[in-house]
Image: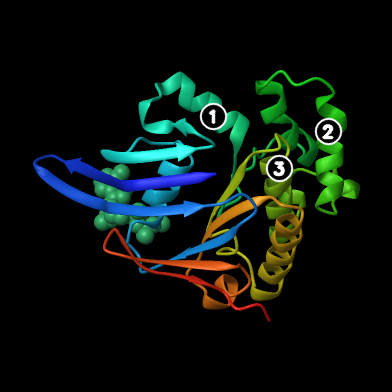
Amino acid sequence: MIEVERLSKIYHMGVQQVPALAGVDFRIEQGEFVAIMGPSGSGKSTLMNLLGCLDLPTSGIYRLENLNIQNLNANQLAEVRNQRIGFVFQSFNLLPRATALENIELPLLYGRVPNSREISLQALDRVGLAHRAKHKPTELSGGERQRVAIARALVNRPAIILADEPTGNLDSATGKEIMNLFQELNRETVTLILVTHEQEVANLTRRIIQMKDGKIIADKRVEAC
Ligand code: ADP
Ligand code: MG
């Protein structure tokens, strides 16, 4: 599903060059559940931005479902993002004035998908929040907000869901609930990639990729427990 070869990203800061990603190689198959770990500044977010088609690599190859992402233009990238990728962020990134249901419906409206209301309600129900459809983000707890964000990520039936520190703003019990939801989705064969610096969170996935200085220094299966 995902194949990257010698993927690299160099940021230019005036005359300075920052090699954020220094040539990484890996494959992720459909249905995998992967954690990306590593110290601050090791290139995790840079990698997620590339996988999410939010940015293009300086060099290297990124294939997503046999599409050569590095060759796409901005419009094509936007289309791939809308149709194949779901994003979940540490800070939820919900629209404050929109209800839970409206937040979920938005990507469908962009894509002009019919029956968007009904599909959004199903997604909200899937994350256990059908009874909160009319609530605005400020009227929801942190865990509920993240569930809404996950429902929004799911609603276009993306090939992959990318989550950058999805439990970073949650207390550990709520974080565990969110991880349980991810585990359930993964059992339903959703492909998930998440960044975390918590070992406990990473242990709930099935594969851990360790990064350091823009490189992969370890890539291990998590033992089933
Ligand atoms: P992580 O998510 O692991 O903390 P990042 O991918 O955010 O790491 O950053 C990797 C390196 O790239 C860091 O040295 C960071 O300062 C640098 N970097 C990240 N984004 C930018 C940017 N937009 N412009 C310049 N340098 C950046
Ligand atoms: Mg980061």
**Disc sitting over residue 119 in the figure:** 2
Residue under label 1, please give it: 80
Q: Badge 2 local density, few (<14 within 10 Å), some, or many (20+)?
A: some
Residue linked to disc 3: 154
Question: Mark 3: which amino acid?
Answer: Leu
- Residue 100 visible in rendering: yes
Give the answer, above or below, for where 19 lies relative to 71. Answer: below
Residue at (39%, 21%) from the top-left corner? 73
Give the x, y percent position of residue 61.
35, 39
Which residue: 50% across, 65% down?
196
Q: Earlier in the sequence, mark 3 or mark 2?
A: 2
Foreground: disc 1 or disc 2: 1
Quadrant location of residue 211? Answer: bottom left
First-in-chain label (3 vs 1): 1
Q: Are marks 3 and 1 in contact (CB under 8 Å)?
A: no
Farthest residue to the right: give it.
131
Q: Secondary structure at mark 1?
A: helix
Left or right: 130, with 222 as reference point: right
Foreground of the two, 41 or 1: 1
Q: Amino acid at mark 2?
A: Ile
- Whether ligand 2 has any atom under 8 Å from the Cβ at mark 2 is answered as no
Query: Which label sits on residue 58?
Result: none
Residue 82 vs 62, above or below: the answer is above
Label 3: few (<14), some (14–19) or many (≥20) C-alpha neighbours in 10 Å: many
Above-or-below relation of 58 to 114: below
Q: Quadrant of the N terminus?
A: top right
**Residue 142 is drawn in which quadrant?**
bottom right
Q: Residue furthest left?
A: 15
